[in-house]
Structure formats: C-alpha cells, structure tokens
Image (tube, rainbow, N blue to C red):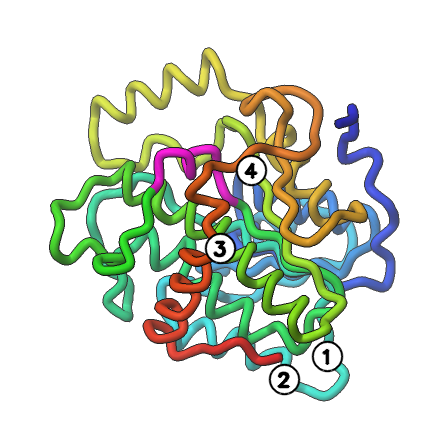
Amino acid sequence: MSDWTASDLPSFAGRTVIVTGANSGLGLVTARELARVGAKTILAVRNLEKGETAAAQMDGDVEVRRLDLQDLTSIRAFADGFAEPGATVDVLVNNAGIMAVPYALTADGFESQIGTNHLGHFALTNLLLPKITDRVVTVSSMMHLFGYISLKDLNWKSRPYLAWPAYGQSKLANLLFTTELQRRLDAAGSPLTAVAAHPGYSATNLQGKSGNQFGTRVADVGNRLFATDADFGARQTLYAASQPLPGDSFIGPRFAMRGPTGAAQRSPLARNRAKAAALWTLSEQLTGVEFPI
C-alpha cells in the first residue's frame, strides 16, 4: 500500500490507451490524467457530443470514437477501427458501466447490466486483444461481494429482476472475467496482463439512476456524507493501468471505500476458477466472440 496519486503517473508518451465510458465520472478523470502524461487517449463513448465536450476539458492527444456496449454491432465496428496493419493499443480500460437501473434489454437481448458491464466488455476485449500490447484493466466494484453468478439465468429471464443483485452479479462477472482472461493469457504464453480495480465509493453520475425515488434519495445522502470524489476513485484505475502488477491483481483503497491504494480483497465467489471458466464459455456462446490468442 502507498499514498500513490495520479501525480505519480509515469510518462505514457508514445502509448495508446482506450477508456470506455470516458465522457463523465471515473472514466473522464482516468482519460484526462492519461492524456496529461502523454498517452494518445481514445474516449470510447456512446454519445459523441458528450464525448467531445469531455475531450475539450483535456490536454494532450485525445480522440473520441463511438462505442455502444449494449450493441454487439457497435462493438465490432469500434474494434474494426483498429484493424489496419500496425495499429496497436497499449492499455484497454474497461471502465463504462451502469448501476442498479430498471430492467431493460440490450440490442442483443441481454439484461442491460450484465450486457453492458460484462458481456459488452468481454466482446470488446477479445476483439481487440490481438492489438493490445500491455494490459487490460477492468473496473469492478465492492458490490461484487453481494453478487452471485447464475449461469442458468444470467440475463434474469426466469427469476424476478432485482436491480442491485443484478449489478452485483455484473461486478462479480468483471472479476471472474479478469481471472479467466489471465489464465488464458498465461496458457498461451502471452506477456499481456489482466487486472481489475474498484473505486471504493465515489460520487459519480452512476448513482441515482435506479428509477426508484427512495433509492435516489439514499444515493444523494450517501454521496454527500460518505463518498469520495471521482479523482480518488479513478486513482485506483490509474494505478492498475500504470504500475508493474502481477496478472489478476485487484486494486482498490485499503479500507474498502477510503485509504491508500493497493491490493484489494475479493469474495470467495470471485476466486472460483471453475465458475470463471464456465462464465467465459457462456459469454463466448452469448456474444459469438472467442479468445483470439
């Protein structure tokens, strides 16, 4: 553990980084800081206008490209933008996410939280993987502690939908995805690393989108009384993106929500390698995207 902050970032000159969901919150801060230290930073966003507004707040080489993680066609089109010979991405930051939203389906029929937070990033990562030179950073949450992966009903088709358990499932999926990705990279002899991070409890635009008036009020109070700012939350991601770390590391604040940045604790379910492998197989079946190495 250390008192590391974004001011300690090394130079990223000559490197290319993709940050999903970079138009606001943690993603905006992550992209802004990486651009500040010299990275060619690609803001992968659903709304180009909001992306351009965010890019205008950043110094450095910043580019905005459209990516809708709720649509596999959009994900494939984004990945195709890196198909030219010689195109590389040093670091992919899977940051975008939605939290505890009302039940909805993605363009491909996935429950929106598992579809956005896990399946969309699963497809994106595997489509880009041959172009990645350093690491994949996936943003999870301490809410993974309350998650349970239902392989029989990942998309909440046969059980009553519950917004927070669905969010917890998607964040647990992020950690299982990281574990299995690293296992596969190691088995293939790849030098790439897969790591995860969580922000603690940072006040961002994620909170208050549950569609529940009471839940919105609770989120407002929590943000005022307990939350850290987006700079603190993004610090965990930036550490994971820049520091020499073992594969399958999980980075976060020492005291869950606050404290120095370093290794974070994960739940026993998040350490289940058999479930990680099974989720990977199911994710390949659902997205039609396979591990390419």
What SS does tag 1 mark? loop
Does the residue at mark 2 contact the one at mark 4 (Cβ under 8 Å)? no
What whole-number distance in Å separates the C-alpha atoms at marks 2 and 3?
A: 32 Å
What SS does tag 2 mark? loop
Identified by mark 4, the residue type is: His
Please identify the quadrant where the C terminus is shown: bottom right
x and y percentages locating residue 65 in the rendered image: 56, 66
Counting residues from the start of the chain, the first of labels 1 and 3 encountered is 1
Q: Residues within 10 Å of mark 4 (few under 14, many from 20)?
A: many
Does the residue at mark 2 contact the one at mark 3 (Cβ under 8 Å)? no
Identified by mark 3, the residue type is: Arg
Q: Residues within 10 Å of mark 3 (few under 14, many from 20)?
A: some
Residue that appears at 29% across and 36% down: 164
- Dot 3 corresponds to which residue? 273
Which of the pair 86/273 is nearer the observer? 273
- Dot 2 corresponds to which residue? 83
Does the residue at mark 2 contact the one at mark 1 (Cβ under 8 Å)? yes
What whole-number distance in Å separates the C-alpha atoms at marks 4 and 3?
A: 20 Å
* Magenta stretch, main secondary structure class: helix
What whole-number distance in Å separates the C-alpha atoms at marks 2 and 1?
A: 7 Å
- Dot 1 corresponds to which residue? 87
Lateral position of residue 116 relative to residue 193, left or right: left
**Above or below, comparing residue 208 to residue 124 in the picture:** above
Q: Which mark is residue 143?
A: none
Q: Is 262 within the magenta?
A: no
Counting residues from the start of the chain, the first of labels 2 and 3 encountered is 2
Q: Residues within 10 Å of mark 2 (few under 14, many from 20)?
A: some
Magenta extent = 140-147
Of tags 2 and 4, which is closer to the observer? Answer: 4
Of tags 1 and 3, which is closer to the observer? Answer: 3
